[in-house]
Structure formats: C-alpha cells, structure tokens
Amino acid sequence: MGAGFFSIMVALYCLGFMPLYRGIIKLWGIHPFEFPFVDTDTVLSAIRCINRGVDVYVSNPCDVLERVYDYSPLWTVLAEFPMTPAWLPPIGMGVDIAFFLSLLLLPVGRSWRNTRWIAAGIVSSATLFAVERGNNDLVLFVLAVCAATLVCRSGACRLLAYGFALLAGLLKYYPMTLMLIATRERPGRFVAVGVASVVAVAVFAAVTWHDLVRALALIPTGSYFEDMFGSVTLGGGLAERLGLPAIAVKIIRLVLSIVAIGTGVRLGTRSHERGVLTVLNERERSFLLVGGLLVLSCFFTAQNIGYRAVHLILVLPALSVLRDTSGMRPFRYALPLAIGLLWSGAWYHDIMAVDAAVTGHHGHSPVQMAAWLVREAMWWSLVTILVSCVTDLLLSSNTVSACRRYVSDYRYGTQREGRTSGQG
C-alpha cells in the first residue's frame, strides 16, 4: 500500500501532473513545498555551507528557507563528501525507499482486518508528511525497525541492535531511550551495554561539545494550534487562549505528565499481573516497546511536528492484536486512537479550514477549539496507554525481573532474620 501510493505520487511528479500531485497532498492535510525533500535539504544544505567555511549554527544561506542548522553534530560527518544540490533528489529518494523497505520487517497482521488497520496507518497524513519532506525522522524509523528486529535474534545480532539504537540517539537525542531494549539481557550484560553506551555518549559529547550546545539551543518551537504535538501543547495553548502567566504552562505540563505517567504505570502493573501482553509474540512485543519508547520520549521532551507521529506505525501490529484479545478496555481503544492521530493532519486541518472559511476565524472559534481539545485528549489518552505497555514490557524483561527477585529475596531474608532475632 505504502510503496504503491509512493510510486503513484512519484509518477505524477515526474510526468508533470503538478495540480493533481499537489491536490492529493493537500487532500491528506499537508501543504506541499515547491520541491520534494525540503527537510532532507536541511542537512545537505548545511553540509554545502560547511564545505564553504560557513558557521551553519549562526546562519545557513545555502538553505532555501535559510534555516540555521539545529541537528546533531554527528550529521556533519557528511562534510567529507563534495555535496552539491544535485545530491538532493537521489538522497531524498533513498531515505524514502529505505523507509518503505523497512516496513517489510513489521510484524505481520494476524488477520486481514488487522492488516487493513496497519495499512491505514502507513498511508496516513503523518506518513505522507514525512515522506514528502524527506525528514530525517525516517532515518530514525529505519534504525528503530532494525533494532526491534535484531534484538529478537542471537547475542551478536542483539549487540548490533543496541548499536543501531545508540546511533539513533546520537543522531537526534530523543531516541536514546531505545537503549532500554537492552533490559532483555541478564543484569551483567545489561550493565556492560549500559557502560559502553555511556562511554560512547561521553566521547561524543566531549568531541562535539561546542557545536552540541549551540544545536540544542536552536531547537525550534511552533504554534500550539498547528500540526504539533507534545506534552507542552495543551498547557501552552490554554495559557495562550486564557491569558495565563508563563508559569501556568509549566504547571499544567507537569501535572498532566505526572497523571499520565502515574496512571500508565499503575495500568501497566495491573496488565503485567494479568498477563495482558502475553498474547503478543516476541517480535510484536519488541516493536511495541521500541515504538512506545520513541513516541513517549519525543512527546515528553519537545514540541514535535506532525510527521514525527510516523513512529506510531511501529506499535500498530501489537495494538491490533490487543484490540481483539485484551480484556482491559484501555487497550481496546489504543489502536483507533493511534490511527486517528496518524490521520490527524487530515481531519484536524479540514475542520480548521472549513470552519475558518465559514466563520472567518482562524483558531479562535468554538468548533476549532473543540477539535484542538479532542486531538489533545487523544494524544494524552494514547500516551497513557503506551506508558502502561512500556511498563508491562519492562517488568517482564530479564534485567528488571532479576532485580525484582533480588529485592524480594532481600526483603524476605530481612524479615526472616527479624523474626528469628525476636524469637531469640
């Protein structure tokens, strides 16, 4: 489905059917740029300017939008190549094709109905947004898919999986949480992987510290009412509309985050005790953990443009199974929520556009505010469910299980010694 749709769009563009090409993209709720892969060019344009001796953390005249470079310094190793504007189409196409090939590694839908759910997520507005822009989050998606697949294999393959997870984290920071997949190892091996990862991050930070600090300071923010999501969005939007002080944004964000994480952990503990996720096979559990970690880390750390919701595709196979098998109601709602959010660029944009055309208001009418609140409620609900899934999966991991047994044995031993001492 995804490759077929992509091929049709490529054919329309190459054959010059631009009105139809742009019309389809707008129908999906996305505003097409004047040329494809504009986000791929964020990195490539910076490389072109670096090769000219320009400090791209200050200005980037090589970029068509003059966007300063705000990504990880690790991308700048591409400066070893004589980058020119002619490199953009093949590299952009390569990123997109790698993304579609990685979808072949997704766990297979257990029924045609489940497969249709997964396909609906793959051809969603979030996917089209990421592919049309050629955004480097697709590179992270490919690395995450490789990590989720290899971590289910032998010891050597698992080490390679942790390498892919670490590389994703060094490229864009928030995927560093993927290193939690190493909890599937025994405690000793987990500690070894953790120490090696910390050393790698420390060396990376020491070598790139000057540019790393500047890049972190340039991470952009956007309107709370556009195609953005994150833990700050609801509080920021309410503060903006109600005229609340800046501290209110932090308070609302903190309270909502505590409630979502606390509720999710409690729900995950209950589902672990009931064995809710035991219906999933190893690969479904692996992709659920990887996708859940990616979505949660970007949601709680930053404002995210809508294309980053593409990581929800990773959890669709597992959520489709839980929708059919789970006896706990929240897990039955997770799949429709994920699909709705993957398509939110379309339905949210359409509601905003139609209402603005009718009322003349942009972002201020009751209908538009209601649509925004519904979208935010969907995100917080799904995030809470994903916290529960990640909690359950981590509680089932080898490292966490061993630690829990150790604590339990220690408490039992202490209590036994106390009773013996009392009897004496």
Image: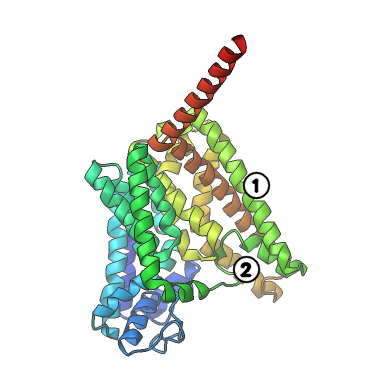
Question: Residue at position x 40%, y 75% from top?
Answer: 39
Q: Nearer the viewer, residue 138 or 355?
A: 138
Distance from the alpha carbon under mark 2 to that under mark 1: 23 Å
Q: Indicate left or right for 10 with 261 as reference.
A: left
**Mark number displayed over residue 259:** 1
The quarter in which the C terminus is drawn is: top right
Residue type marked 1: Val
Q: Position of residue 345 (x, y in %)?
A: 52, 64
Find residue 357 and report its image quarter. Answer: bottom right
Residue with the mark numbered 2: 225
Relative placement, left or right, of 312 versus 91 is right
The N terminus lies in quadrant: bottom left
What type is the residue that disc 2 sits on?
Answer: Phe
Q: Characterize the local packing of mark 2: few (<14), some (14-19) or many (20 or more) Cα atoms within 10 angstroms.
A: some
Q: Earlier in the sequence, mark 2 or mark 1?
A: 2
In-front residue for pair 392/160: 160
- Kind of element beneath mark 1: helix
Question: Answer yes or no: do the residues labelled 2 and 1 have beta carbons within 8 Å?
Answer: no
Residue 379: in sight, yes or no? Answer: yes
Residue at 73 percent of width and 63 percent of height: 248
From the top left corner, tell me how far across and down residue 22 is, in percent. Answer: 42, 76
**Location of residue 190 in the rendering, given as x and y in whole percent from the top left corner:** 36, 43
- Residue plotted at (37% across, 49% down): 194
Mark 1 closeness class: few <14, some 14–19, many ≥20 residues within 10 Å: some
Can see residue 112? no
Q: Position of residue 252 (x, y in %)?
A: 69, 57
| On screen, residue 210 above or below 417 | below
Give the number of the mark in front: 2 or 1: 1
Q: Is residue 216 above or below residue 176?
A: below
Q: Residue furthest front?
A: 424
